[in-house]
Amino acid sequence: MNVALVDSGGANIGSVRYALQRLGVEAGLTCDAAAIRAADRVILPGVGAAAPAMARLRESGLVDVLRSLTQPVLGVCLGMQLLCARSDEGDVHGLGLIDANVQRFADREGRRVPHMGWNRVAAVASNRLFADDAKDGWAYFVHSYAVPVCAATLATCDYGGAFSAAIGRDNFFGVQYHPERSAAFGMATLRNFLAS
């Protein structure tokens, strides 16, 4: 299977690549449009801020490429947020593939921002990412911004209120958690994406 890891400048690329290797898949890191279009699966990883990540995609000429893909695409953490219409982080427009706006967690007493650590994920819609082996489980999160529960929500998590742990529309999917750091549940998410 030909899997392309989009070089968006994210810090989690090495760990995503290693997780895929454990599943028997060698993924190439690339910002080459032809390689991304030719891939069987595309993963948009990301750790960092929305504005610099979108700027890098624009500079690499990948915004329209990503929007036009017809094969399964998975955004991870910031990569999921970039699939959305807009982010409050830097007031930046995303790829617009998911009709949702990314919002910062509100400061509340007793709730730290960023949301960091293990939390429970519960699938709310039947979809490719959450088959029988991965409908509910514990996943690892590190983020200050989140997608509210919306029509595209595939799974939720609670951190002082529900937010989207996973989203999807057509061939585009996103997970807010880090599947590469989420033990068996995360590996099941990646395995189901690869099998989709």
Image: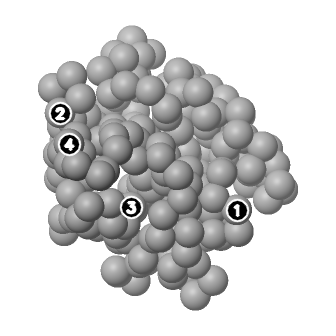
Mark 2 in CB contact with mark 4 (< 8 angstroms)? no
Q: Amino acid at mark 4?
A: Asp
Q: Amino acid at mark 1?
A: Ala
For the residue pair 34 and 31, the one nearer the viewer reads as 31
Q: CA distance from mark 4 to mark 3?
A: 19 Å
Q: Which residue is mark 1?
A: 183
Mark 4 or 3: in front is 4
Q: Position of residue 125 (x, y in %)?
A: 35, 81
State the SS at label 1: helix
Q: Earlier in the sequence, mark 1 or mark 4?
A: 4
State the SS at label 3: strand
- In the image, residue 49 sits, relative to residue 165, either above or below, namely above
Q: Which residue is mark 3?
A: 165
Q: Amino acid at mark 3?
A: Ala
For the residue pair 2 and 76, the one nearer the viewer reads as 76
Q: Which residue is mark 2?
A: 88
- In the image, residue 121 sits, relative to residue 63, either above or below, namely below
Q: Amino acid at mark 2?
A: Asp
Q: Which residue is mark 4?
A: 107
